[in-house]
Image (tube, helix red, strand yellow):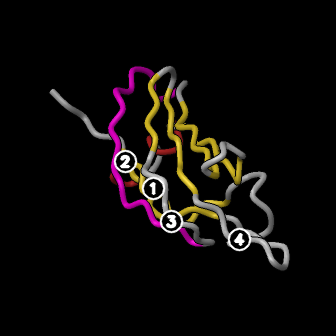
Amino acid sequence: PPQLRKGSKPPAAFASLAVRDVSFRTKTCAPSTEPVWDEGFSFLIKRPHEEALELQVKDEGGQALGSLRLPLAQLLATEGLLTDGWVPLGGGGPGAQVLLRAQLGVSA
């Protein structure tokens, strides 16, 4: 969880996810140092070797709390085209991380 200064309140946070020019936003969670979204989003991936998932966690005022960039080529090298686990957030302070499940699927 992010480090809070004494007397400060935890943020009401949301996450935004984007691939190319398509983006989604989660609901805003009640103030917490451990928000839970449990939401799924689908993107049409055209060039997995070149594209990346961009995730940003922000407070309700829009201030960045942390971010990550997941090159989709990494998923091509995994069993089941899947990653599922804790991922550190850049710019989020020590210990800032998000539990992320990302999977490539093939549709006909």
- Callout in the foreground (1, 3): 3
Q: Residue farthest to the bottom?
A: 6
Which mark is on residue 30? 3
Q: Which residue is mark 1?
A: 83
- Give the CA separation, mark 2 to mark 3: 28 Å
Query: Mark 2 is on which residue type?
Result: Gln
For marks 2 and 1, the one nearer the N-term is 1
Q: Position of residue 107 (x, y in %)?
A: 19, 31
Q: Position of residue 96 (x, y in %)?
A: 70, 65
Query: Mark 1 is on which residue type?
Result: Thr
- In contact (CB < 8 Å): disc 1 and disc 3: no
Q: Which residue is mark 2?
A: 103
- Give the CA separation, mark 4 to mark 3: 11 Å
In the picture, measured across the screen, residue 36 lies left or right of residue 40, that is right
Q: Residues within 10 Å of mark 3 (few under 14, many from 20)?
A: some
Which mark is on residue 9? 4
Query: Mark 3 is on which residue type?
Result: Ala
Q: Quadrant of the N terminus?
A: bottom right
* Residue visible at 63% across and 41% down in the picture: 69
* Secondary structure category for the residue under label 1: strand
Whether residue 4 can be seen here: yes
Query: Mark 4 is on which residue type?
Result: Lys
- Callout in the foreground (2, 4): 4
